[in-house]
Amino acid sequence: MEFNSGFKGLNGTHHILVYVDDDNILDGCVHTVMENTEALLVGSKDIGLEVNADKTKCMGMSRDQNAGRSHSIKTDNISFEAVEEFRYVGTLTNQNPIQEENKSRLKSGNAGYHTVQNHCSSCFLSKHLKITIYRTIIFNAVLYGCETWSVTLRGEPRLMVFESSVLRRIFGPKREEVTGEWRRLHNEKLYDLYCSPNVI
């Protein structure tokens, strides 16, 4: 969300993300962030709001992994603590956000899967109902906040392995007509049965 009304002191193109009572000020220059933070503090006071210094954090990000630590920002006699990572609307943000966020989301997906694993393998529930359980409980837990991800080639296999393991539990093994042996379904067959786009 681009926010420019009420804060006339904000410089240039404003990058302020607003969610309920949380604001994120983004810019490529620390000086501009400080100026915009001061303008936000003044504008907040004008309408009777106050910025909580204890909950306000600042974080610098760089493509250079050796850029060094962020420094705290002082403005309007308030010091904002510098942090290496923070969680915003459920999504972890740090210098290596995608890998860490993928791990966190897969952990949540595993937790969700373990709460419903008996349902996923139950012979009393239809495949359609099991897929609905997967899509509403597990799938959403894994992909929460995925709009902010740029999935790498390294991250794709982890998501695919997770999804195929859940789908194998849902669809179960297949019995060979000739030998009578049971075998796991291959990925192609799994996704033919699933009939929905994969997690990627």
Image: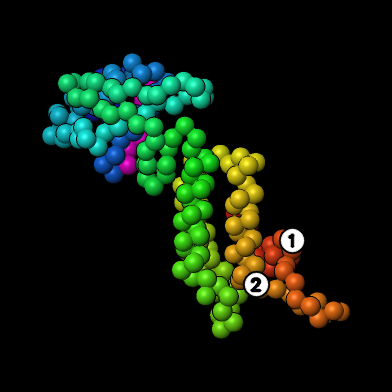
Q: Does the magenta stretch include residue 68?
A: no
Q: Where is residue 137 in the image (x, y as percent from the top left)?
A: 47, 64
Q: Earlier in the sequence, mark 1 or mark 2?
A: 2
Query: The residue tagged with tag 1: helix, strand or loop?
Result: helix
- In space, the residues marked 1 and 2 are separated at their CA atoms by 13 Å
**Residue at which label 1 appears:** 188
Q: Which amino acid does label 1 sit on?
A: Glu
Q: What stretch is highlighted in magenta?
A: 13-19
Q: Residue at x 74, y 61 (%)?
A: 188
Which quadrant holds residue 130?
Answer: bottom right
Q: How crowded is mark 2: few (under 14 residues within 10 Å), some or many (20 or more)?
A: some
Q: Which mark is residue 171?
A: 2
Q: Where is residue 132 in the image (x, y as percent from the top left)?
A: 53, 69
What residue is drawn where x is 75% and y is 72%?
A: 183
Residue at horizontal 56%, vertical 79%? Answer: 122
- From the viewer's side, name the closer residue of 129 and 69: 69
